[in-house]
Image (cartoon, helix red, strand yellow):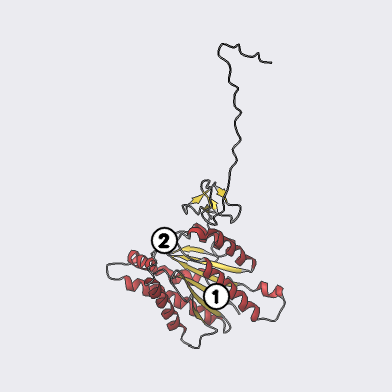
Amino acid sequence: MTSLAVLVDGSACAWGAFAEAKREKPGMEKEVLTRAFRSIVTFSNVHLSLAQSNQLLLYAYGNGMSKKLLYDSVRSDNPDSSSCIIKGIRGALRENSTSGDARKCGVLAATLATAICQIRKAATLGTNKSEETISGQKGRIVIISLLPDFGSQHSLLMNLFFSAHKHDICIDVVSLGGSSALLQQAADITAGVFQVIHKIEDLPRILMTRCLPVSIRDSTSFTTVDYRAACVCHEKLVSNGWTCSVCLAVLCSFMAICPSCGAVFKITVPRRKRKRPTEVGAAPSPRP
């Protein structure tokens, strides 16, 4: 059994901006969203059709959503997976739109951690073999992202990327909102694929040729990856900076209080030696 977790950005503002940017003419925003959702449905159904025991997990990550797991092919009683996926995505965006979430940074860490745990649980329950065989089973995660920045979640996400690599979970990234250095690192660490979509017509082709199982997907060489860390104070990539010794947060300049964990740091400055005052009219002491 192969488990596939599809993580879709649940920010209604981000999807609205994407539809407005990719429309051919005013008033066609709905058609752009329909094409994107149909591409996700088609890709999900192809995964389910590859093997009867395959599992599909659909998540939406964002603020203000009470339910992040939108669809589980194993637990669902509805045989129509297409309608369940469309209904789940629309419900998540509708719930996010009423929460007042106008963020410019993605909220991915909690949902990604849940997806990794669910894949490991499915692999463990799906076999009675030894742990070595279980670890050899590769689960897959496909992240469909619209926001390239993730704010202060850099350290959390890096830990999750290395955890996915340890458990042989491949992370593929399809970015609809431009290049993301952090998501490039996720794909490179886990031997996955990072792809930026410039036209909505290319989304189904990229999902089919780049995000299918390794044995049948297109194996194109990966580009160079920017491994610079993002500072938590300004959320910008830095080459040199300061690191908090408590939470390992990256800072572009020294701060007495860590903005991530609140740790307080002190710097002891060596005191300068004071010169002895000389009396007026007194001859200077000879130098040795």
Classed neighbour count for the residue bearing mark 2: other residues with Cα under 10 Å, few (<14), some (14–19), many (≥20): some
Nearer to us in this view, 116 or 269: 269
Residue on which disc 1 sits:
4
Asked if the residue under mark 1 is in contact with the one under mark 2, i.e. CB atoms within 8 Å, the reply is: no
Query: Residue 134, image x and y in percent?
Result: 67, 75
Query: Residue 156, image x and y in percent?
Result: 56, 62
Instruction: Judge whether 21 appears above or below 285 on screen.
Output: below
Query: Residue 282, image x and y in percent?
Result: 59, 12
Residue on which disc 2 sits:
104
- The amino acid pointed to by label 2 is Lys
Q: In the image, 57: left or right of 18?
A: right
Q: Residue at x 61, y 28 (%)?
A: 273
Nearer to us in this view, 288 or 242: 288
Question: The N terminus lies in which quarter of the figure?
Answer: bottom right
Instruction: Judge whether 161 appears above or below 35 on screen.
Output: above
Nearer to us in this view, 173 or 156: 156
Instruction: Judge whether 201 appears above or below 1 on screen.
Output: above
